[in-house]
Every structure is written in C-alpha cells, then in structure tokens.
Image (cartoon, helix red, strand yellow):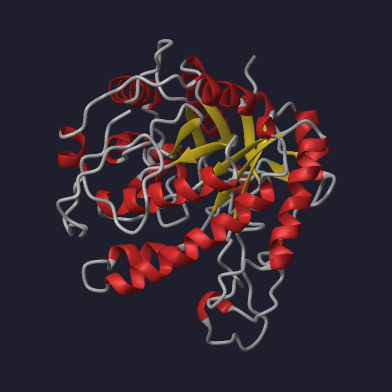
Amino acid sequence: MKKILMPLLGFAMTTMVACSSDSGKLSAADSSSSAESSASVVAVDYSLGRAMNARLGRGINLGNSWDSKSYSGDVPDEPYNYGYNDDLDAGWGNPIKDGDFEIIKNAGFNSVRIPVRWQHNSNPTTHEVNPERLSGVMEDVQLAIDQGLAVIVDFHWYQEMMDAANNYTNDPTTYEAEKTHFLAIWTQVATALNTFPDSMLVLEIMNEPTIKDATVLNDVMLSAYNVIRSAAPGKTIMFESYHAAKFGDLGALQLPQDGNIIFSGHYYEPYTYTHEGLGYTCAGDETYSTTATTDFPKYVALAQSLYPDVNGGHIPMNMGEFGVAAGARSQCGADNGPSEKYWALWTKKTIAVAEKYDISWTYWAFTKVSGFEAYDRYNNVWYSGILDALFQN
C-alpha cells in the first residue's frame, strides 16, 4: 500500500491512510508522477481479495442493458433525466432475460459483471436512486447467485461526474455537488446489495474513469470507497484507474490498506484492430496485432512494486473488459472487419497471458454489443468458435 501524502477533499479518512493537512485544494495538473514518487510501499495481506478474484475466474459482461438509456418522446430538462420513465435495462433493446444466467453458467463461466447507469432517473434533490432500477438489478444479482455465478456490480457511464471532475478548477462547487450525489447513490446501493453473501458479490466503484487529474481521481475513488466499505464491511471493492481503466495507470491510484480489494483494468490493445468500424478504419486483418505477452508482465511488475502482498505476489488483478468486434458481428461487415480466425487468435493470446498471471477476466460482452457479442440472441446460440477461444483448458 502506498501511503497518501496528498490532500484529499471533502471526506473523512477512516481507513489506514495518512494524509497531510497543509492544503484543502486539488491541483489542476496531472499529479500521477508526484503522487507515486512521494509515496512509500507497504505490503498488505490480500488473502480476501485474492480468494474473491479466484472465484470471479472467467466471467462475461452483461453490457448494454442496465447501463442503457432511451427516450421515446420529450425528455424532461432535469438532471439525470429525473421523472422520465425510461425502459430501464431495455433502453437499448437488450434486456437481461432470466434464463441468461443459466445459459452463461452452463457454458462454463464463473461470474458475470453487471454494468449499471445508477444515476439515470435518480432524484437530483434527495439523491434517491431509481427504485425500479435498484430492485431490477437486485433481482438479476439473485438470479446469477442462484446459478452459482459470482457477480460484479459497477457504476457505469457516469459522465456527469467525469465532466464535473474535469472542470474542478473552474467550478469546484459543481464538482462537490456531483460527488455528493455519487456518494449518496453508492450508500444506498451498497446498503441494499450488502444483503447478498460477501463471497458472491464485488462492488466496482466506477467504470473507465476519464478524470484527467490523478488527485481528483483519488478524491472520487477514495470517497466512494469509504462509503461503500462503511455500508458493506465484508464486500470486495474493485478499483479502476484513469485513461478509461488502463492497467498501466495503477501508479496514479492511492489505494487504501485493505486486503479485500481488486484492481481492474480494461484491455483492447490495439484499438485500431479491436474497434474497427467503431471510430477506427475498417481494414480487416491488416491492423491485427497483439502485444499482450509483453504488456501483461509489465502490468504485473508494476503491481508487485506498488502493492505487494505479504504472502508473496501483489494486489489481485482483474481484466474487466476485453474483446474484438469481429466477423459477421463487426460494424464493418464480415468481409471488411477482423476475421473470426484472427479474432480467435487475439482472444486466446490475451486470455492465456492473463490466466498465466492469475488475472481474472470478464469478456465484453454477452449479447448485442456492437460487434463484440459472444451470444447470438436471435438464434439463441453462442457464436461459432467463441467458447473454444474463451475456454482453452
């Protein structure tokens, strides 16, 4: 654990973290380098986090469902679209079905990740999360657990928080107000989800942070960590770093001295290949490349140097999203996007090296996710070759 020697705004530190008291302001500059260089390293017993990470094992995301939103008419001009009765997990036409969890379990997965846009339809005054959203997510968590699947529940697509954090210097009042809303929602969600067994549920603070300043990022993350840990004392808590959850940015985080946490990164390298047709040129297999075998040893070495485990090793690590939009599923079309052959090769190499280092993973994603889907919802079958690539032994 690296002790925090920088000031953090707006919350009382109740964990084993040391803070200076010389200032109450966040800097505007990216502070990851100074934060890392000023911190000391203390080994932590990550036995609890390691056990939960092993239980997560091989997982799959249920994306474009509870993280969706839709508008079928005039949308009220209210923060978070409060008062607008949207379609909940069917906002993008991809609702989770009760039988999906049995399909996923029978395929050989150990866990699911459920992305949730918790702020959507929340009350901007009372900070109450939409009760139908909360009850619906809880129903799905129970269905997953009933199948023996461990569950990661995350806070997805919180653009309001990102925007406020990135404008902190010019408008700290809006930032503090947004953070208050964020923490209030997490308090409700963590309290409700704490009814599920500690051994079956992970709470992930925020998906793919795009907060540019490391000090602000840590203020957001550690503030949320404190309220989650207070509401759910025995739950494993998952952290991501900035630049949209890059493994290599672990050094920007100032993690608490807590053995029941996991660090998660997302891996789509190189985007020119994995995201063809999604902002990148359709070039078929011409852009194929994989550097996983050299990337992951660097990530592991970084984790070992910054967050060592007293038992040997390092903080538990998870690959929370990865995949390639390929084949007939590709936005480029079957003839212009990545081929099934090279999709499988990229996937196999990425998973092989992750599992070599005991990194759990959750594939992006189950179905109807812009070309990344593993399951054909229309024909109710797994796409050809998908499971062979995902499960190599």
Furthest toward the top, the residue is: 312
- Left or right of 336? Residue 243 is left
- Evaluate whether residue 377 shows in this view: no
Task: Please tell me which residue lies in front, 63 or 135.
Answer: 135
Write the residue at 47% across / 54% down: 277
Q: Position of residue 9 (x, y in %)?
A: 30, 57
Write the residue at 15% across / 41% down: 34
> How many numbered discs, if any?
0
Q: Position of residue 61 (x, y in %)?
A: 62, 43
- Left or right of 195? Residue 339 is left
Q: Quadrant of the N terminus?
A: top left
- Left or right of 126? Residue 182 is left
Write the residue at 47% across / 25% down: 316
- Left or right of 202? Residue 108 is right
Looking at the rendering, which quadrant does residue 133 occupy?
A: bottom right
Q: Position of residue 98 (x, y in %)?
A: 83, 48
188 to 47, vertically: above or below: below
196 to 186, vertically: above or below: above
Q: Quadrant of the C terminus?
A: top right
Task: Please tell me which residue lies in front, 59 or 386.
Answer: 59
- Evaluate whether residue 217 shows in this view: yes
Q: Position of residue 3 (x, y in %)?
A: 27, 33
184 to 141, vertically: above or below: below
